[in-house]
Amino acid sequence: MNNPSSPAVLSVSALNQAVARMLERQFPLSWIAGEISNFTRAASGHWYFTLKDDGAQVRAVMFRGRAQYADFMPREGDKVEVRALVTLYAPRGDYQLNVEAIRRSGVGNLYEAFLQLKDKLNAEGLFDPARKRRPPLFVKTIGIVTSPQAAALRDVLTTLARRAPHVNVILYPTPVQGEGAAMKIAQAIATASARHECDVLLICRGGGSIEDLWSFNHEVVARTIAGSEIPVITGIGHETDFTIADFAADVRAPTPTAAAELATMARADWIARVDAHAYDLRFAMKRQLGEAAQTLDWMSRRLVNPSSTIGQERARLAALQNRLHHATRIPLDRARLSLTRLTHRWQTHKPDTRNARLHIARDARSLVNCMQAQLRQRHQHLRALSAQLEMLNPQRTLERGYAIVSNEKGEILRSPHALQPRSNVTVRLAEGTAQVGIASVQQQID
């Protein structure tokens, strides 16, 4: 028989699941640094490895959906940083890390510094496309800023020798990696800009890790590139590598070889373009000469003796004058005849207005006399009404010694019944008003 007060009995599965939930709630996603050990890539695409340091180790798994986005394949002994969720693999009861992202150790700090500097320079307008220049189409001399021992230099020289052997090359040697390399790169760029020896400047370096390319992520290099008086093309690293110098340059090429190709046009292309332009020029000249010859023939056919042309124009002018004379004289004669007829008809039917004018003048005098008589009558009536109105004016009544009494509400009082002892009334006299207090009220006895 079970004791109700005894604690519940958990299964192993329930225990492990409860522990897993507790770990996931207690430890959110975090970055953890360590060394890769026992790395295995399963057929399913999942990664299994151990993350360790000098004092401890922990198992980790990175599922295929996350592993496919990693930019490198970890190897034994790699120093890495993983963003992981602490959990428990319930079937075995093993505590492990569920990895969401992985990066090489130290890359996070470098990338953070890269983003901060990029945002700062971008806010200053250093990367504004409006300030970038197009490299010249025809280049006589190309400057190269790189290390003399760099493989990138050999690639660039090989490309230039193949595409444009007529172009001169000036090397501004500088280390591209290591302590103080950024300052030396900036000095080489400044030297090339000050000397004005070349038409375009290439900044080249082969591929590598973010640490290897870090010399090109310094602020001094970016500002020197932006201040260069010569157009700058960068070819740093591989196609997927981006540095601060790439954003500051006028043109960014994915590789050093591509930078050399962007800086020059192939000699064969130049020759082909010149031949094409020469053909177009010859064709255009032939067409213009043909059109000019055709125009000359047409003008020669139109050319006649000037005296003959003048005689024809004189005859044409005389004909036009004759037409103008007839065109203006006939309508004028018709208008004059019509005016004569209308004048005669008007004289015949013109009414005699003298009697009508006398009658109108007589009626006007009569009307004026009538209006003046009515105005006199109206003025007399108005004066009589004004006299009556003046007699009924309350002000005249007040001037005879009467007064108007009203209460506090402005109501006029006509009877002693409306007065209350110890109340105030307003008495209006002829020349003003007065506030009067009522001491007592006495009724009139009939």
Image (tube, helix red, strand yellow):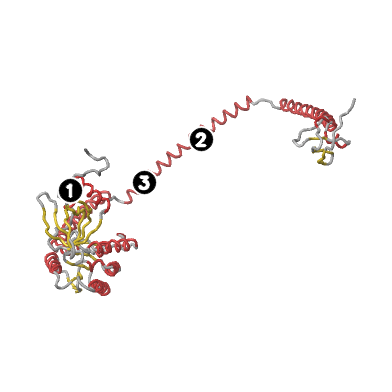
Quadrant of res 154: bottom left
SS label for mark 1: loop
> Are dots 2 and 3 in contact, CB under 8 Å?
no
- Locate the N terminus and report the quarter of the image it occupies: top left
Q: Which residue matches tag 1?
A: 90
How far across and how far down the image is residue 253, in percent? 20, 61
Give the labeled residue for mark 3.
313
Which is more N-terminal, label 1 or label 3?
1
Q: Classify 10 Å Cα crowding around label 3: few (below 14), some (14-19), many (20 and above).
A: few
Going from N to C along the chain, the mark reached first, 2 or 1, is 1
**Which residue is the extreme one toward the front?**
1
- Horizontal arrangement in the rendering, residue 26 relative to residue 379 (left or right): left
* Residue 224, percent from left and from top: 28, 69
Relative to 280, residue 149 above or below? below
Q: Are marks 2 and 1 in contact (CB under 8 Å)?
A: no
Give the spatial CA distance, label 2 vs label 3.
Answer: 29 Å
The residue under label 2 is 332
Foreground: disc 2 or disc 1: 1
